[in-house]
Amino acid sequence: MLRTMSDGWVRRQERTRGDVLAAAGGIIADSGVEGMTMRKLAERAGVAVATLYNQFGDREGVLVAFVANGLDQLEVELDAKPAEAPIDATRALFAGFDETFERHPDVWRPIFATLKQQPASHGMGAVGDRVVAAIEHDLAKAAAEGWFAVEVDTEALARHLFVTRMNRIEKWAHGAIDWEQCKASSRLGLELILAAVLVEPHRSTALAASGVVRAPID
């Protein structure tokens, strides 16, 4: 009986969280992050303001939770079609980010323009660390299969790849570059970094994927 009551409470908490995050996305799309007050969010989600503070802490906590939820959904999609080779999993992860942001730029752009700097990975705290851990896991597979021309600190490389990508996203969020420039620059940065440490034929694959090589690579 106690377990049933506990399971029911967890499900209600999950439903409330889902309602709040869906409401947050709607408000941001309509009014930007500035228009998302905790009171307005509570009204739209149909919950008490106190519930928001208990679950998320503050508005910044809601934004971080929104980003984390987007990552959860992306991980489910990627798990359904796992990459066949190392490095491709990292490419798929970043491509998934691009697809997500491109589907709802009216939501994601203001979020990344507003998200305050926090400890850990590029100001995204535990969410950023999750992404770095996923990339590092992929790079460790590549290292185990002898893909690197030198001994690589996979954790440091994973963090650098993530921070480089987030720098491009921030430039887009603040209007310094448009979306197509963001994607092209992000792809270039990823592939050139990889090409610097990979052995053949993986180095040539990365150079070709970067988009800067005009002639076929032998």
Image (cartoon, rainbow, N blue to C red):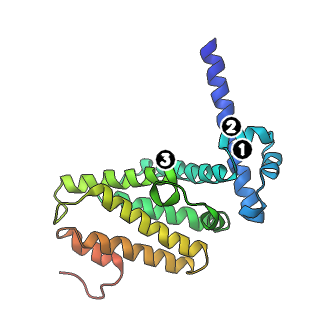
Q: Amino acid at mark 3?
A: Val
Q: Which quadrant would residue 204 be assigned to in this image?
A: bottom left
Q: What is the x, y in percent for residue 172?
A: 56, 75
- Spatial CA span between label 1 and label 2: 6 Å
The location of residue 162, given as percent across then percent down, is 42, 62
Q: In terms of sequence position, does the residue under pointer 2 or pointer 3 come before the other? A: 2
The structure residue drawn at horizontal position 45% and vertical position 57%, both measured from the top left corner, is 121
Q: Which residue is mark 3?
A: 76
Cα–Cα span, label 2 and label 3: 18 Å
Q: Nearer the viewer, residue 39 or 44?
A: 39
Tell me if residue 206 comes above or below residue 67 in the rendering. Answer: below
Residue 19, numbered label: 1
Q: Residue 89 at x, y = what percent?
A: 36, 57
Q: Amino acid at mark 2?
A: Arg
Report which residue position mark 2 lands on: 15
Q: Secondary structure at mark 3?
A: helix
How many numbered marks have been drawn onto this rendered protein structure?
3
